[in-house]
Structure formats: structure tokens, C-alpha cells
Image (cartoon, helix red, strand yellow):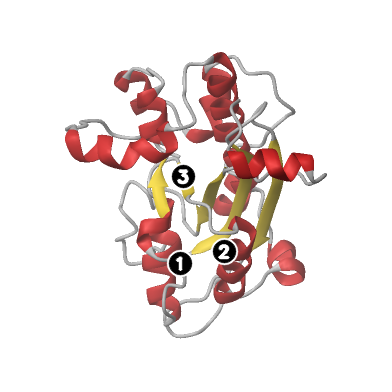
Amino acid sequence: MRLAPNAILDLLNGKEPDVKTAIIFDCEFLCLEGSQRRFWCAAHDPDPVVTQVGAVRLALGGDFPILDTYKAYIRPIDRFGDQYGLDPFFTALTGITEENIRSEGVSLSDALADLDRFSDGARFWSWGKDELNMMAISCYVAGIQPSIPAHRFDNAVKLLLAAGMPIEDLARTPSNKLADYYGVQHPPLRGHDALDDALSISYTLQHLMKAGDLQPDAFDLARSAARNRNFRYHLSDK
């Protein structure tokens, strides 16, 4: 890794050089069985508000280490200000319980502020566009202003395209199966846990950068690449 002049000066002065980072995040949204197929439009479906967010700070230099993680449970509030109960299907799917929400749950505004502080200004990447539910829908339902602007978010699928993953495989590989798709060795992960799904993506990106199949500058080039190509694919169910 080539160091910039200011990083070399930091080393000479006994300071650790700044390393560019990316924030890989994932969310879990309130649902009943079949809500996703119905686009949350049945009379009994809840609004798809965020109930859990997990994030990973991934270094884009050196050995591409995972520097830190963040996880929060969010109290799911409906459009009338009342707290939703959790359906047994949702708890079985995600592992999130009423006790988690009762003992560890925070408000959406507090969770977003904490997530923004955790990011330290780095760009957010999710497997798809989780921010549309986390920010646009959840903030709208809660009656608060989105606190993180849209340009701070991007789609990690672009990075896998840059690394050469076939579009057909992208279409059938959810975030929690991504590390397994590449045969990456990792600690046990629970699918549909926001932090574990973010870790699955992060382990994969780390593996691809170490192998040289994904260059760190792809995190900067993804925006322009998406504008210049017509990507036709659908993400599998998360």
C-alpha cells in the first residue's frame, strides 16, 4: 500500500496514519409472514419500519481489517405514535424479541445519530438499498426529518459486479449467503441478524480485496459506473 505524504509524516511523528474506511450496514424491518411478497400492502401488514441496524467499519487499506462494529435495536413506532408488537414469525426470522426491544431498544432518531457518529463521515453500503426503508419510510412514519443525506449511501451490489460476480448469481444470493458463496471462512453468523448480515458482506469484500479481485478505489468509482451501465438484475429476498 502506498502511503500519502501526510500519512508518512504521521508515521514519522509516531502517529497512526488515517485509513480510508467504508461502512457496511444492514437493517431488519418489521414484517409478518408474506409481507415482502405483498410489498407490505395487505390490510394487516405493518409499515416496514426498521427494528434493528447493524454496521461494520471496514478499512480500505493494509490488510483491510474490520475496525469496529455497531448494533442497535430500534423501538418500532407506527404512524400514530404507538409501539408495534412483534409477530412470532418476525421473531423466528430475525431472533429479535420483545425483551430485546424493551431492554435495549432506542428511538429511531437516537439510533440514526449513533450510526452517523459511528460512520465518522464514511459512506454507507448495503446489499441493495436498505436506506430507503431505514431513512425514507421509517423517518416518514415516525414524523422526523431524515438525518443522513441520500448521497451518503450506496449499493454494495455494484462492488460485487466490479469484482466479477455474475449477475445471475447476484440475483439469487442474499446478503447472509454471500460469504458462503465465496467460501470465506468466518465465525458462525445468524441470517437476518442485521450485524451478522453486514459481517457476511464485509467478510466477502475483505476477501475480494485481499485476493486482488476488488480494488479499494471501486468504492469511489461505483457511482460513476452505475450511471454509465444499464444493470438489469433483481436481488434475491434478503
Q: Closer to us: mark 3 or mark 2? A: 2
Q: In the image, is residue 213 above or below residue 87?
A: above
Alpha carbons under labels 2 and 1: distance apart: 7 Å
- In the image shown, does 235 or 7 lie closer to the viewer? 7
Q: Is residue 69 visible?
A: yes
Q: Are marks 3 and 1 in contact (CB under 8 Å)?
A: no
Q: Closer to us: mark 3 or mark 1? A: 1
User: Which quadrant of the view contains residue 24?
Assistant: top right
- In the image shown, does 185 or 84 lie closer to the viewer? 185
Alpha carbons under labels 3 and 2: distance apart: 15 Å
x%, y% of residue 162? 36, 25
First in sequence: mark 2 vs mark 1: 2
Instruction: Please give the name of the residue rendered at 26% of the width and 34% of the height, measured from the top-left corner.
Output: 225
Dot 2 crowding, Cα within 10 Å, few <14, some 14–19, many 20+: some
Q: Badge 3 is on which residue?
A: 126
User: Residue 116 got which mark?
Assistant: 2
Query: Helix, strand or loop at disc 1?
Result: loop
User: Which quadrant of the view contains residue 140?
Assistant: bottom left
Tag 1: residue type? Answer: Ile
User: Residue 63 got which mark?
Assistant: none
Tag 2: residue type? Answer: Asp
Q: Badge 1 is on which residue?
A: 148
Q: Are marks 2 and 1 in contact (CB under 8 Å)?
A: yes
First in sequence: mark 3 vs mark 1: 3
x%, y% of residue 30? 49, 59
